Amino acid sequence: YGGMPLILRQKTPQDKSKYLHDLFDKIYLDDIMARHKLGHDKTVLDDLLDLMASSVGSPMKYYYSDVGLRNARLNFRQQEENHIMENILYNEFRVREFDIDVGVVEVTAKTDEGKNKRVQYEVDFVANRGSKRYYIQSAFAIPDEEKRKQEIRPFTKIQDSFKKIVVVREDIEPWHDENGILYVGIEQFLLDESAMDM
C-alpha cells in the first residue's frame, strides 16, 4: 500500500484501496487537469498513467514515487514483486540524493556461425553521488547458479573498479563473490545506508 502517511489510519484493505484511489483521482488528477487546463476529458491522461504504471521495471524505466499509488492505479492487479522491488530501490536512491541512470553495457560476441554481433546487457541502476558510483542489480531471487551468473553478467563486462551490488529479496548475510560483487538483502540495504559499502 505504499508509504502515504494516512494509509496507516485505514483499517481494512478496502479502506486502503479507496483512500489511494481517491487520493489519485481527486487530488492528483483533478489538480493536474485544472492546473494545465486540460478540460474535463481525462481519457488520454488515464491511458498514459495506466501505461506508465504497467511499465515499472521494464526498459521504459518509469517509476512511481509511491508504489501504493501505482498499485491503486492498476487496481492492485499487477503485483510483479520484482518490478515493485526495483521501484522501491529507485525511490531509496532518490531519497539518498543519488543521480540515477540505467546502465547499458555493449560487448562483441560470436554467433553460432562465427560472426561478430553486438550484445547489450542492462544494469538496473547506475547510482552516482559526487565521486561515488555504484552499479546495482535488483534480483528478486537467485534460486540457482545460472540465475546468479545471469544477474552479474553485465558487471563482469564493466571495466572499472566501482562497487557492484546485487540486491535480493531474501534476508541474507551480506557476502562477496570471487569478483568482489556484494550480495545483500533488500531489508538491510534499505535500513542501513552503509550496507552499500560493505
Image (cartoon, grey):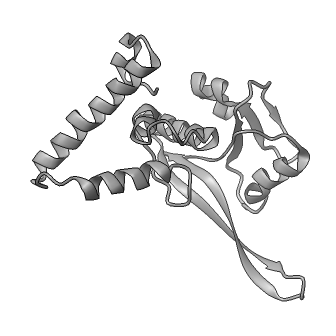
Count of labels in the image: 0
Q: Nearer the viewer, residue 153 or 10?
A: 10
Residue 140 versus residue 192 in the image, above or below: below
Q: Quadrant of the C terminus?
A: top right
In the rendered structure, the answer to whether residue 195 lies left or right of residue 60 reads right
Residue at image position (58%, 42%) is 86
Q: What is the quadrant of residue 105 in the picture? A: bottom right
Q: Report the residue at 74% width, 55% height from top.
A: 155
Along the line of sight, which residue is nearer the eye, 10 or 102? 10
Identify which residue is drawn at 44% across, 38% down.
Answer: 75
**Can you say whether 8 is above or below 144 in the image?**
above
In this orientation, which residue lies closer to the viewer: 7 or 194?
7
- Which of the 4 quarters of the picture holds residue 114? bottom right
Residue 178, percent from left and from top: 89, 45
Q: Looking at the picture, does residue 69 appear above or below residue 126? A: above
Give the residue at x 73% y 32%: 184
Please indicate whether residue 157 sits to the left or right of residue 59 in the image. Answer: right
Image spot of residue 179 (x, y percent): 84, 48
In the displayed structure, does residue 6 sit left or right of residue 189?
left
Residue 131 % position (x, y): 53, 47
105 vs 145, nearest the viewer: 145
Position of 127 with respect to 46 (left or right) is: right
Q: Position of residue 51 (x, y in %)?
A: 42, 55
